[in-house]
Amino acid sequence: MALRPNLRILAALAAAGLALTACGSSNSSSPTAGGSGGSCGNFKIAYMGPLTGSAGALGQNMVGGVKMALDAYNKKNADCQVTLKTYDSQGDPKQAPPLATEIIQDPSIVALIGPGFSGESDATGKTFFAAGLPSISPSATAVDITQQGWTTWHRIIGNDSAQGAADATYLKNTANAKKVFVIDDGSAYGKGLATVVKDGLGSSVTGSDTVQTGQTDFSATVTKVTSSGADSVFYGGYYPEAGLLVKQLRQAGYKGLFMSGDGSEDPKFVSTAGASAANGAVLTAPAGPAPSSFNQTYKQVNGSDSGLYSTQSYDATNIVLAAIDAGKTSHTDMNDFINSYTASGVSGPIAFDKFGDVQQTTIFAYKVKNGQLDTANPSPIS
Amino acid sequence: MDFSFLFNNFIELTITGLALGAIYGLVALGYTMVYGVLQLINFAHSEVFMFGTFAVAWVMVFIHGTGQVDQSLWTSIGLLGICLVAAMGTSALIALLLERVAYRPLIKKGAPKLIILISAIGASFSLAEFMGLRDKVAAWFGLEDNLSDYVNQARNTYSSPITVDPHGLFTVVNYRVTDVDLFVIGAAVLMMAGLDTFVRRTRLGRGIRSVAQDPESAALMGVNSTAVIRATFLIGGLMAGVAATLYMIRIGTTRQDAGFLLGVKAFTAAVLGGIGNLRGALLGGLVLGVAQNWGSAVFGSQWQDVVAFVLLVVILLVRPTGILGESLGKARA
């Protein structure tokens, strides 16, 4: 039995009103600094990046590092703990902006660990900068992010100009590559890294191609590589495509070197490629292996092994926690603290330059041997 | 624009394009059959395919464990046979589930096609997300540890432990044709021929053609339209299961959204060949696969989708009913 038109409109308005109040209340009830617990600020640290999605494994490593740092801090400060709030963007620059808006509207969040990936950093940098929220990214390596004038954006990992230059050096000096085929996936990170590598290689580049994230059949690209007579392939992109690409290259008879950057430096690269195709691949990352004591504690807190970016996010969280301890919790104070912070972290020496990049960085080359990605013994590239 | 590259590697690009297109064609058969009978674009067919790929991977993990190994096509043939049965069964089951839950209630109510289309889209997302949340579902039953090899990291890529290594069989001009290439193309042609024979020669096939031509007259002639519709979905699911097995042989890795892009391409292939036309579906698939590769060769791989879809538009402008045109209902007896 249909309600009379007036009653129907009234019911719809009432439902809309209820929905709006439900949305509104989540913002207004969050604790402000100096809330219920006397002098305890009930501060939160936000993480935004991939947790699910095709490269979600990398994000899980980052959150694990944050949780490890918070666990140690909260044990020492049981009466005034800092909590983590995670925002899953799947590393997607289309999903990140609304999450960024949510983050800046929460006054209890003092800093952001993230964004995880370069594309989403580009997409949300302006929002965070306009709100003044300081952020430290453990993993976004694209060069252009720190050229935008976002003085609150920092990264605790070497950027792609360092990584790409090191990759080109490795190809020229260590691998003695004469004809390199460079492939990228068109993403902010992949294309950026591949471009730096191409610039560094100069005339050794024998061809290039662009594929897409989500692509599974690379037969045309594989044909290009094999017919160009390349002795090395460099891929700028993430592990799902890198794994399939190297698999199809090997099946087509390609015997040369396969090299990629930190987006591929994950054990899933090996399982996607199949053990024999992945063998001999060189994957670089601006991050060294974690010391075994770090991995032990990480495993205790998180129940799984640490991975790429865990040490970076651990160090980044500790910077924020040090700022909280020093009472520097407003956005400007926190940002100044980060800018002037120097220490020796698990991931390496920490000091930020005026653009937000970390000053010293070493690029490590990880190799796949006997069907396993050797994460313990990479060689630094000089 | 690099035409010399295309000409120098013509055979390789064409044969690998045919192998890619064969998989599109098999999935396109499902789209085209359902459209021919119901005038419905079964958006969720991509998830029917995706479930099939997971069935293959899970059977391999179940029988072989997670250790990675390389094997030739011939030594894997027994295991692949079991995987094929599992994939066909799983895809058929999902297709029947879809028909029963998402479409039949609406068809019975005589709902407009647009409403059924929305149901299809919703079903597609639900199935894909369900696969992406399978670790949570396993946790409801307390099985997330026992089944961790199957449900762990549910949104990450999932690879089959057995890599099928292609072996070169013979050389054409400058390309060594592999056993996997021939197997994939041959299997698709065989399945299509079998399906074509089924639709033309059997009673149920005649029923499908009659419901495609005119559902009301068919009902008057005593054709059980519910059974026919169920059979259509079942057959589409079986074809998707075969496609899933071939996909896992060639690519070897899947994910909960693996069906999405492939489904769009397969549907495009079905339209390209003539929607509602079985041979058209396979032809459309092969044409699309080859066009994609040739387009990549001439313009660069980032243009491959542009080339495929521009081709679709051009062909429809010239021949709006698709390459082969005639539909399921008008197939000769």
Image (cartoon, rainbow, N blue to C red):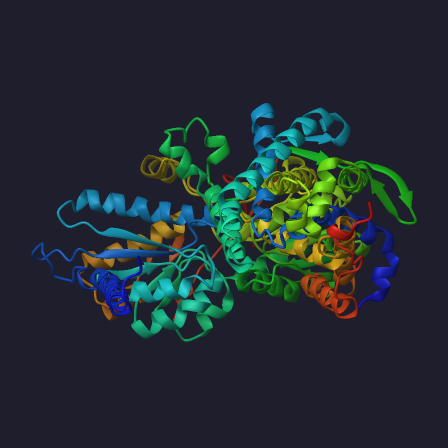
Residue A189 visible? The answer is yes
**Residue sitting nearer the eye, A49 or A143:** A49
Residue B248 lies in quadrant: top right
The extreme left residue here reads: A38
Q: Nearer the viewer, residue A107 or B85?
A: B85
Residue at 21%, 58% in the rendered image = A324
User: Which of the 4 image quadrants contains residue B1?
Assistant: bottom right
Left or right of B5 on screen, residue A234: left
Image height of A69 relative to A188, above or below: above
> Viewed as shown, does residue B288 lie left or right of B138?
right
- Position of residue B91 measured from the top left corner of the image (x, y, whole percent): 60, 38
Seen as rendered, the residue at the extreme right is B173
Is B169 or B92 nearer to us in this picture? B92
State the image coordinates of residue A286 (x, y, percent, origin top left). 49, 54
Q: Residue at point 69% right, 64% down?
A: B309
Residue A134, image quadrant: bottom left
* x 31%, y 64%: residue: A102
Of residue B329 and residue A218, the one placed in the foreground of this image is: B329
The count of marks equals: 0
* The C terminus of chain B - image quarter: top right
Q: Where is residue B295 drawn, in percent x and y? A: 76, 62
Is any part of residue A370 visible from this angle?
no
**Whole-percent x, y for residue A366 in the image:** 56, 45
